[in-house]
Each structure stands twice: as C-alpha cells, then as structure tokens.
C-alpha cells in the first residue's frame, strides 16, 4: 500500500514538472515575441522620423541658401506638418495640407500687413482662413490647419522684414513635402509588407498565449490575450492606410512602376489577414469561455493551437521574404490533419476552437494567394 501510494505521488510529481516546464517554455516564447514587437514599433517610427528630418533639412536649405531667408522657421515646420499629417493616401493628402498651410499663411500675413494685429484681427484671421479652406474642399483637419497656420503666421510676422515672407516659407516647406510624398514615400512597398509581417507575428504571440492559458486553465491570461487581440483592429486600420499609400505611390511615381504587381499582391493579403485576426478573436474568446464554465478542451486541440502558432511564424517569414517555404506548407498540412476529426466527447466550446483553427488555416492559404476553393480543398486533403 505504501509503495503504491509512493508511486502515484511520484507520477503526479513528474506530470506536474512536465506541465510546469511546458508552461515556462511557452511563457518565455511569449516574452521574446513581445520584445520583438516593441522593437518593430520603434523601427517603424525611426523611418518616419528620419524622413521628416530630411524634409526639414531640404526645406530649410532651400529657404535659407536659395531665397536668402535669414531665419527660415516656417519652411521646415510646414514640411514636417505636411508629412506628419498624411498617413494613408499620402500624396493626395499632402497636397490638401499644402493648400491648408498656404491658405492659412497667406491669410494671416495679409491681415498683418493690411490691418495690423489685435483682438479682432485674430478672430478674423481664424474665421477667414478656415472659411477659405472649407470653400476649397479641404477636410476637417485641413480646415483646422489653415486656421492655426494663419494665426501663427500673423503673430510671428512682426519679426519678418519681407512682405509675405512667412507665407512664402510655408509654401516652400509644403512643396518639399509634396515632393517627398511622391518620390520618398513613407509607405513604399516595404512598409505594408513589414506591417503585415508584424500583425502575423502578433497573431502567433496571441495563439501561444491562448495555448498557455488553456493548459494552465488561466482565465485572466486568456482575457488579457483577448484584449490584445481586439487592439489589433487599429493595426489593421494602419495597414489599410499603408496599402492605399503604396497603391498611390506606384501609380504616380515612375521609380516604382515595375512593382505594381507586388503591390497588388500585398493588397490581396489584407482581407485574409483581417479575417484571420477576427477568427483568432473568436477562438480566444471561446477558450476563455471554456475555462470560465469548466469545459475541458482536449489536449490535442491545445497542441493544434501551438502548431498553428508555429505555422503563423512561418507565414510571417514567408510574407517578409515574399515566398513560402516547404516548412510552412508542411505545418499547414499537419495542423489541418490534426484537426480534421473531432475528439471523442469534446464539448461545444472545444469544437468552436477546432473550427476556428481550421478557418484560420483557410485564411492563411488565401494570404498565400490561393483561391477560396483551393484553400478549402487543402484542408480536406484533396489538393
């Protein structure tokens, strides 16, 4: 009796150690992925900051050395504003902001030289600049920008020795921004590709966290993963803007005419990546529900989520490199095979999890450019 009790205790201890080791491994993997995600966010901002800095240098140099403006304040400022407020359909919006900045600067300096500066002039400048911008068809941000620029120019024009000098500076900066938007775009081909890769890597991290939460039956961890998954909606909106931007760039810039096919392929990835994120949110929410109500998700389904996370990493690499790997194809096929049949006695929540895994697999095949019928056939083992 004592020997039997000791053996059972040892077996429970070994199972606990194995489960703890697996939980520690998945936690470490999740931490590494989160660190990589933060690094990617910084790299994306670094490119934007560098472009704004270069545009400011060019605008300042043109105003100072070509047109001999002693202290060209508005040229670099206008360039930065135009680039900084034009995320998505960048060239068109840069032109709109150029109009807003130019209108505001012109109205502000006109009032200063013709009527001076005082309380009523300040109100008149704001109203006139915003009204003119509205009549020209500018959007709400552009209308506000016109009013702000008009007010700032009027307040600073007292230090300018040249009539309409500040307006001319703003025009120089705006024109530089338009050139940068068309020739040195922030959303060239690399940016939507990099953002798509980052979203897929985030999805892999979320799937890993879900598997860990199910293994530990940790409802709080699953709810946290669900919150993070819902937050990706803003990232998808950014990706849509980047994709629109890339489409516009290849349409207007001769430097990128040869990459139109690549941009179309990147644009085609957007919808299946969006669906994959939505299906993942359903998967995570149902996993949290299963833990909350005490339903057991079979261990084979948890392993399938881990396999799907690994396949997502490989898909992210394929998107980044522009070609799928044999390892990715094998991972997709293996996950489809492992989830083809329901586990005996699996409860409703578990079956929803399995269904969502397979739905995400269909989305992944479509990310690779495969038609819906072909993607479904591959899940059924017919391709």
Image: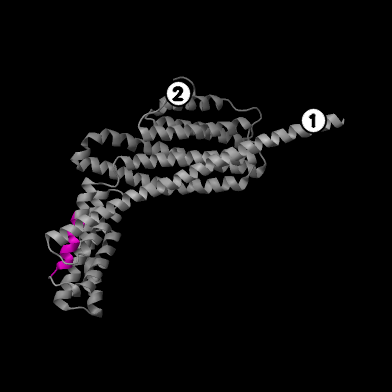
**Residue assigned mark 1:** 7
Q: Nearer the viewer, mark 2 or mark 1?
A: 1
Figure check: 1 above or below 232: above
Q: Residue at x 55, y 41 (%)?
A: 28
**x, y (%) of residue 356?**
52, 35
Figure check: 257 above or below 329: below
Figure check: 182 above or below 100: above
**x, y (%) of residue 210?**
56, 40
Outermost right residue:
1
**x, y (%) of residue 311?**
48, 31
> Magenta residues?
163-175
Q: Within 10 angstroms of label 1, few (less than 14), some, or many (20 or more) residues?
A: few
Q: Secondary structure at mark 2?
A: helix
Q: Is residue 1 left or right of residue 217?
A: right
- Distance, label 2 to label 1, CA atoms, is 49 Å
Question: Residue 164: within the magenta?
Answer: yes
Between 319 and 380, the one lying in front of the other is 319
**Residue assigned mark 2:** 377
Q: Residue at x 68, y 36 (%)?
A: 17
Q: Residue at x 64, y 34 (%)?
A: 347
Q: Residue at x 17, y 63 (%)?
A: 169
Predominant secondary structure, magenta span: helix
Image label count: 2
Between 310 and 92, the one lying in front of the other is 310
Quadrant of res 80? bottom left
Is residue 132 at least partly visible in the picture?
no
**From the image, which quarter does the N terminus lie in?**
top right
Q: Is residue 7 left or right of residue 126?
A: right
Is residue 9 at least partly visible in the picture?
yes
Q: Sequence order check: which comes first, mark 2 or mark 1?
A: 1
């Amino acid at each position: 009796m004592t020997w039997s009790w000791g053996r059972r205790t040892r077996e429970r201890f070994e199972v606990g150690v194995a489960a703890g080791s697996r939980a520690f491994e998945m936690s470490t993997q999740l931490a590494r992925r989160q660190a990589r995600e933060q690094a990617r966010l910084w790299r994306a901002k670094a490119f934007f900051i560098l472009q704004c800095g270069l545009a400011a240098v060019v605008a300042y140099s043109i105003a100072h050395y070509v047109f001999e403006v002693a202290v060209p304040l508005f040229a670099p400022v206008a360039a930065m504003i135009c680039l900084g407020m034009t995320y998505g359909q960048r060239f068109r919006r840069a032109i709109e902001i150029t109009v807003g900045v130019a209108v505001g600067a012109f109205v502000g300096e006109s009032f200063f030289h013709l009527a001076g500066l005082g309380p009523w002039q300040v109100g008149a400048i704001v109203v006139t600049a915003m009204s003119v911008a509205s009549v020209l068809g500018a959007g709400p941000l552009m209308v506000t920008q016109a009013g702000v620029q008009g007010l700032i120019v009027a307040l600073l024009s007292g230090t300018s020795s040249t009539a309409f000098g500040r307006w001319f500076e703003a025009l120089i900066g705006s024109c530089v921004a338009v050139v940068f938007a068309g020739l040195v775009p922030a959303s060239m081909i690399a940016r939507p590709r990099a953002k798509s890769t980052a979203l897929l890597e985030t999805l892999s991290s979320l799937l890993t966290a879900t598997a860990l939460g199910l293994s530990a039956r940790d409802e709080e961890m699953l709810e946290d993963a669900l919150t993070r998954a819902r937050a990706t909606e803003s990232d998808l909106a950014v990706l849509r803007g980047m994709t629109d931007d890339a489409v516009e760039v290849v349409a207007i810039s001769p430097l990128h005419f040869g990459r139109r096919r690549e941009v179309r392929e990147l644009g085609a990835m957007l919808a299946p990546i969006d669906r994959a994120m939505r299906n993942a949110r359903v998967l995570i929410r149902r996993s949290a529900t299963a833990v909350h109500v005490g339903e057991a998700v079979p261990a084979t389904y948890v392993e399938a989520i881990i396999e799907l996370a690994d396949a997502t990493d490989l898909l992210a690499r394929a998107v980044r490199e522009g070609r799928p790997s044999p390892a990715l194809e094998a991972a997709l096929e293996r996950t489809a095979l492992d989830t083809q049949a329901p586990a005996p006695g699996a409860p409703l929540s578990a079956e929803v999890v399995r269904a969502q895994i397979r739905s995400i697999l269909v989305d992944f095949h479509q990310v690779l450019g495969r038609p819906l019928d072909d993607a479904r056939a591959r899940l059924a083992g017919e391709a």
